[in-house]
């Protein structure tokens, strides 16, 4: 990890996501995406394998009314041996090692707060001389019933560093 004034630059190892694409606005998409992913990790897969709930829940907008919602599978899960989903809306994705700029913040989950943080992160990344790769995405670490002021959230964007 490398600290910048407004974000951290982190190196993420290879990992596996279970994810679903949903139609819906920011809040609605998060809710729609959570259910099939939760069913998958609680055994609704071809091997009836159960996985521990891991954090964060990742959300990325793919259009004005479409989202991809993902769970990170536990460390050590291999994409070649992970059980296939029974629900054809759920997919498995290997994420290669990469660098991301990350801004951590506390508080509730709403679209306005995430958008403001994403814009600030992109400005800070450019000011630091880094190049964003793709769009910002969001990570939520806490259950919905946790009080907002105690919630841990992040906005992230993949980056490349100058040669």
Image: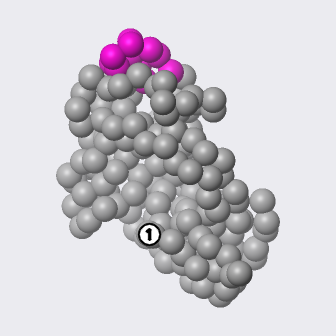
Q: Residue at x 24, y 27 (%)?
A: 87
Relative depth, front residue between 123 and 27: 123
Q: Quadrant of the C terminus?
A: bottom right
Relative depth, front residue between 129 and 81: 81
Visible in this render: residue 140?
no
Relative to residue 34, is residue 74 drawn left or right?
right
Image location (x, y in percent) of residue 43:
39, 16
- Quarter residue 61 falls in: bottom left
Q: Is residue 39 above or below residue 1?
A: above
Image location (x, y in percent) of residue 126:
60, 85
| Residue that extends furthest to the front in the rendered view of this protein | 80
SS assignment for the magenta stretch, majority: loop
Relative to residue 141, is residue 85 drawn left or right?
left
Q: Which residues are magenta?
A: 41-51
Q: Is residue 58 magenta?
A: no
| Residue that extends furthest to the right in the rendered view of this protein | 2
What residue does disc 1 label?
A: 135
Q: Is residue 48 above or below residue 101?
A: above
Visible in this render: residue 107?
yes
Relative to residue 86, is residue 106 drawn left or right?
right
Query: Dot 1 lies on which element?
Result: strand
Q: Quadrant of the N terminus?
A: bottom right
Q: Residue at x 35, y 25 (%)?
A: 84
**Number of numbered discs visible in the structure rendering:** 1
Image location (x, y in percent) of residue 161:
67, 76
């Amino acid at each position: 990890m490398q600290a910048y004034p407004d974000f951290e630059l982190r190196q993420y190892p290879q990992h596996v996501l279970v994810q679903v694409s949903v139609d819906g606005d920011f809040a609605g998409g998060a809710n729609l995406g959570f259910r099939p992913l939760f069913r998958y990790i609680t055994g609704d897969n071809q091997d009836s394998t159960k996985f521990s709930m891991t954090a964060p829940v990742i959300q990325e907008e793919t259009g004005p009314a479409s989202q991809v919602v993902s769970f990170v599978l536990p460390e050590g899960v291999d994409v070649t041996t992970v059980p296939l989903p029974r629900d054809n809306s759920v997919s498995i994705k290997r994420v290669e090692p990469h660098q991301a700029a990350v801004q951590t913040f506390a508080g509730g989950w709403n679209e306005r707060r995430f958008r403001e943080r994403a814009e600030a992160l992109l400005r800070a990344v450019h000011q630091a001389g880094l190049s964003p790769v793709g769009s910002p995405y969001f990570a939520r670490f806490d259950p919905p019933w946790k009080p907002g002021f105690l919630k841990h959230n992040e906005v992230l964007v993949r980056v490349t560093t100058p040669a």
